[in-house]
Amino acid sequence: MSGRRSGAPPPLPLQRSWPFGSALPPNQGRPRVSARCDCHNSKVWKRTNRLIDEIERDALDASVPISSALRKLVALGGRAGSKELRDWAGLELRGYYGTDVPLPDYRTPGATLRIDGGTFNAMITGQLISPSELPDPVNKHIDESVPLNGGVAEIEAMIDRAKRQESGEIKLTLPSGQDVVRLMNYEMQQRGQHYDRVTAIYWSLSHVTLEGVLDQIRTRLVALVAEMRAEMPDETDVPSAAIADNAVNVIVHGKKAKFTVNTAQASSAGTATTNPPREKRSVWVRLGAAIVGIASIIGTLVAVAAWQGWNPL
């Protein structure tokens, strides 16, 4: 006789229990998980590791030197075949010295004009003067803005050096500064100020001003990437030369984009391209020539005065 009472319900089927914390058998108690992950999708990987994306990440990260992103921009300009992109990035890296390219407005920050010198009984350091106090023709070309022709590495070095100084001041000499000093001393002697003498003239500015210049360059780099990305098809890695050139014209030079107009007729087709006007050359070359000419005249006057036994300087 079995142990089951008459009329009792049949027992439930036995179920295998699993200890707490042990692994469940395959395909039981959990959903199936595919081993494939979208993060390994070639298209996703490709779009987050393009050169233009690296440039954007470097430009947005203030801890990354701006020179790093600019070098990558040179490489991107090479791949795109864009001379405008390579030229702008190269000028920012190497500087504008010895070129006919006009200096961008963001590279002419405000600065004060100061002189060092002495009088009969005192020494003068950092005396503030107005550009109108400069001799002709210097006062027509010098104002309270300093041209920064050096590359970004040079600007970064000036910032580091200024931060190590207590004053945080940066002094930049004027073009042909010693000739300007000779002109100022000569004019003071002509006015009878025989005991006054200027020894140096320079622009003075803070390292904060130079940091603002680097920030302007970084901001333009971000805007360049955004402008190119807005015109690039999603499936492409590199912008076309036309897209890159137009981005430089719009963001850096503030010009209208260069348009290529295709014209078609019944018998032939043609292409017309509108080019922006060329910028005027800088006045520094003309100013330097004028200063050298006047300095030569003063040198002659000094020689005659010395021959007569009088030292005007």
Image (cartoon, helix red, strand yellow):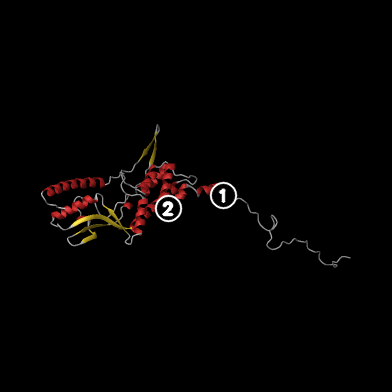
Relative horizontal placement of residue 91, taking residue 143 as reference (left or right): right
Look at the numbered disc 1 and give the secondary structure of its residue.
helix
10 Å neighbourhood of mark 1: few (<14), some, or many (≥20)? few
Q: Amino acid at mark 1?
A: His
Residue at 36% across, 38% down:
272
Residue at 56% across, 48% down:
41
Relative horizontal placement of residue 177, taking residue 52 as reference (left or right): left
Residue 37 appearing in the image: yes
Do the CB atoms of the residues marked 2 and 1 lie less than 8 Å apart? Answer: no
Image location (x, y in percent) of residue 101: 31, 45
Q: Which residue is under mark 2? A: 59
Q: Which mark is residue 40?
A: 1
Front-lying residue, 309 or 117? 309
Residue 135 appearing in the image: no
Relative horizontal placement of residue 35, taking residue 78 as reference (left or right): right
Locate residue 90: give its quadrant. Answer: top left
Farthest residue, direction left: 308
Image location (x, y in percent) of residue 250: 37, 48
Q: Amino acid at mark 2?
A: Ala
Image location (x, y in percent) of residue 84: 38, 44
Look at the numbered disc 2 and give the secondary structure of its residue.
helix
